[in-house]
Image (tube, rainbow, N blue to C red):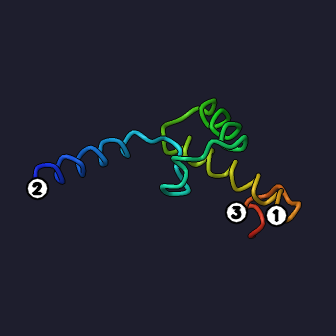
Amino acid sequence: MSKIILGLVLFFCVWCGNVQASCRGLTSFFDFSKDHKICSEYAAGQNGDSFKKTDAYCDCRERIDNKKKYGLEKTLKELLP
């Protein structure tokens, strides 16, 4: 039984290590929205390592969320001096 649990933990760690754009936790694995597709394509087109691409994806999602909620297309970093 312990081998099965260890195998599942290792599989989960390896699987999560390959995720490029997940700034929303485990719920982002099941996100098939139009916003996700737009931001994924935008992030994939950015130059840089996986950290920069993940930041670009998260900023894109934040911009879209702010536009929907508040009518502003700005991130928190841009609003604060």
Callout 3, which amino acid? Lys
Front residue of 6/71: it is 6
Image coords of residue 56 (percent x, y): 63, 45
Residue 77's label in the rendered image is 3
**Neighbour class for label 3 at 10 Å: few (<14), some, many (≥20)?**
few
Q: Nearer the viewer, mark 2 or mark 3?
A: 2
Disc 1 to disc 2, C-alpha distance:
47 Å
Say left or right for 41 vs 28: right
User: Which residue lies at the image location 24% right of the left edge and 52% below the top edge?
Assistant: 9
Say left or right for 14 vs 27: left
User: Which residue lies at the image location 48% right of the left edge and 55% below the top edge?
Assistant: 26
Front residue of 71/79: it is 71
Disc 2 to disc 3, C-alpha distance:
46 Å
Using the rendered view, name the quadrant where residue 57 is placed. Answer: top right
Q: Indicate which disc, 2 or 3, sits on the residue closer to the N terminus.
A: 2
Residue 69's label in the rendered image is 1
Q: How many marks?
A: 3
Disc 1 to disc 3, C-alpha distance:
17 Å
Callout 2, which amino acid? Ser
* Pointer 2 residue: 2
Residue 3's label in the rendered image is none
